[in-house]
Image (cartoon, rainbow, N blue to C red):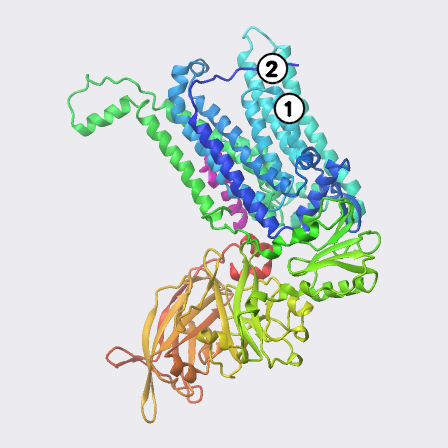
Amino acid sequence: MATRKLQSTPRTSGFDGYRLLLFGAILLYTGLFTRLAFDQHLGMRTHKADLGQIDQAVWNSSRGRFVEMTDNGFIATRLTDHVEPILALVSPILWLWNDVRALLLLQVFVIALGAWPLYELALLRLDQLLSSTERAQIWHIEPLRQMTRPLALALALAYLLTPHLQSAVLTEFHAAPLVVPLVLWSFWAIETRRLVQFIIATLLVALVKEETALLAAGLGVWALWKFTQYAIRNEPAQRAFISRRHLVILSSCLLVFLLSLAWFYIATFVIVPAHAQIVYQGADSIYFERYGALGDSPVDIFKSFFTQPGLVWQIATEPARVDYLWGLLAPFGFLTLLAPEIILLALPVLLANLLSAYPAQYYGEFHYSAPLVPYFAVGAAYGLGRLWRWIGRRAAGSSPSFQHMPAAGAGTMALMALLRNSRTTLRPMLAALLGIWIVAWAMGRYLDAGRGPLAARYDPTPITAHHRLLNRFIVQLPADAAVTATAAVHPHVSHRRYVYQFPIGLAEPGQADWALLDVTTNTDMAPGDLKARVEEMLAGGWGVVDAADGFLLLKKGASATQIPDAFYDFARNRELSRTLQTELPLQLVDVQVEDWLRWRQTKVVTQWLVGPSFDPALGAPRLEIVTPDGRLLDSYSQTTPPALVWYPPAHWQVGEVVRITTAPLALPATWGVIIDSSNADAIEKTAIVSDDGRDWLAAAYQRDHQGQLQSLLTDDPVALQVANLSASTVGRLRVAGQDNSTTLRLRAWLSPATAWPGGWVQVWLQWSEASAWPEGYRVFVHARQQDKNLVQSDGPPRFFIPYRATVALAGRGLIHDLRPLQLPLDLEPGQTMTIVIGLYDPVTGQRADVIDASGNVIGNELVVGQVQIGPPPAPDQTCALIAETCAAQ
């Protein structure tokens, strides 16, 4: 069998600065996204599923135990879910750096490295504008490459800017992204007719994961086709059959195809079922259950293409799935559409993602899409090559002579000069335009959905002193200890044979003798349940080895059974405690939010100064999180924060600042924090006097169009920051009284100006220019269609809580009034609703007059504006996976 390169690639002389630029881009990508991945891990936003369990399987493989891991309390194997021999092949990296971050670095680096074979492949395809003889001559190839190198670089940069790959490397660690450079290597080896490299790369593709064996089979088909073409072109015409050498080559390609299919069958239908039985009590892979109405077995799913084609088409054309295809095509300027045969090679995996009922597979923000990106990139390289050849052959003029032309104007002469010299003028211009096209689409897609700086999905992880403290506890764990750890701690201690997610491992069949817990991060347990389990352990033979700031290190048989005071520091702010004083029983010091943009998970952090007259018997402070219309979303009594579970008011000391952080909450687009007025002195500048004299607004937030939380309140008590408001409407309303009349100035906005059936419209009102609210009068806000009120919001002014309007208006001169309206579900897209507002007396029904600048009455209601009814937006991935977050999309 031939092992040498089948045809040499023409070499060019001189320095290729574009390769140097590409090398720099690869290093920049690796540095940037490695930092983001490391910070995500150090900031404890990685978990047992999936980083912890995969890392343990890789670490065990590096110690001779093939993809072994502990799951559900007993020794298991990664083969219960997937067949990923590549994990064992990459495991020696842990011999060099025995840290889970080595895998995160590897994942980013191999993705970045894929840009290199893509650049070389694109260059080869673009060079085919010349004949094989011309490509071997430097005086032909070098002038051409002055144009094709920038195009190839543009394509490689588009690959690096692809959001799907960036999301993959920031979704912990998985085997699937490792296939990306291997696929690109295989395509390049086929194009350059390097048989041995093709075989190695393609077999490695098959070993990444069971479904990537189908990708390897497709590469085998592609190689068979390309090598057959080459054999036919290069065999002498008089031969009836191809040579033995080419027959061996084609047989090798066919063998790769057959071996890949056989491996797919064995991995999917033999290995996984045999091991899954222990964990899932079923013989079939659980991943076939992700296809809903199409069936829950490979046979049923395949049959649906013929028995239910309408259903398959309906699923495939859902807006989110169309957006998924758009997201794969757009980074490469849709050039992939010029080489559809490349996408056919990846069709099984593409359909598996596109038709899945599991949103993570078809939204592109997990790792599932990574194996598809190289096919769309290669398709773009082939499509760009075809377009370049089509353009180049139509811009082949090279003669500088046009003196034989009759005299003409300067414009005509310039145009003819361009056309007759198109090889040296028109081609470079077209090459520049193509490069701009590719980079523009790639940058646009990156800014819209990328995960790096300046992109809409950029969400760096903050690293706090608490996170840095974790290593103090890890170093105390013996290397051979069996450990049970909370979910966010697990991947930090997974380099050991026995590691469990707490509380697994405490009872048979588990065998943990150490426990490392962090009560402040993801535990997958309610705080009260976690505390109760710890108390059981301390009463049942476990003891405390170390504790600080919410971390707790326990060991079976340790003597200390009391939790040290330093453990409770996560619920205290010692620095503020030394600088603040109060005479109140309990005073609110600060309100902040911790927001994880990717999942719209928000924690509300409040800090409370304990005064000398604080009575622990009265319990914890009262805090509620509410919608603008006062609907309760969460409260300390509804979901008890970890600080109040572990450090209740009975333990609070006079003069200390207690920090209370809620559990992660899925909150709507606009929400506020209200507290008991007796604790509100420190935030008087933003306080609102309520009608019951108890509740005060401490903070209010709204998500902007990029999902970022924006505070609605400023240091100015009458200022208001609101995102996405339409143009304002200003009017005056006059209420006639027995002695005199009251005139109010009203300014109103709509947010948004376009809504959908079942969606929300917020009407923002500001009342001013009166010393007192007209007694007895209430606000009405109506959403009207053809003189029929479809939805309304009536009542006194309110901004998360009702005002004592007269007191508030007299004291501040201006009050805000926020009215959310939920539109009816039976509206049709294309319809319009009119929003009108006014004042009325609920006893008499009398309405206030709307007056103009001269004081003339012009009606009894003010039109704020119109709301266009459009189709509901397609849910984003966070909404599709976590229904509670949809209101904030």
Which mark's residue is nearer the viewer, 1 or 2?
Answer: 2
Give coordinates of residue 612: x percent, y percent.
Answer: 59, 80
Viewer-nearest residue: 405 or 198: 198
The majority secondary structure of the magenta stretch comes to helix
Q: Amino acid at mark 2?
A: Arg
Give coordinates of residue 659: x percent, y percent.
Answer: 59, 67
Viewer-nearest residue: 583 or 6: 583
Give coordinates of residue 885: x percent, y percent.
Answer: 56, 60
Task: Please say whether residue 343 is visible from this viewpoint.
Answer: yes
The residue at which mark 2 appears reads as 4
Q: Find residue 237 and name its label.
A: none
The image quarter containing residue 508 is bottom right
Q: Amino acid at mark 1?
A: Ile
Farthest residue in the bottom direction?
Answer: 738
Mark 1 vs mark 2, CA separation in Å: 13 Å
The image quarter containing residue 830 is bottom left
Which residue is at 54% across, 71% downward? 626
Is residue 332 in the magenta section? yes
Which residue is at 58% across, 22% downward? 225
- Determine whether the residue tagged by mark 1 lies in a helix, strand or loop: helix
Q: Is residue 620 left or right of residue 155?
A: right
Compared with 564, 18 (above or below) is above
The residue at which mark 1 appears reads as 199
**Disc 1 crowd, CA 10 A, few/some/many (<14, 14-19, 20+):** many
Q: Quadrant of the N terminus?
A: top right
Q: Is residue 806 left or right of residue 219?
A: left
Q: Is residue 852 left or right of residue 68?
A: left
**Disc 2 crowd, CA 10 A, few/some/many (<14, 14-19, 20+):** few
Extent of the magenta region: 319-336
Which residue is at 58% across, 16% downward? 5
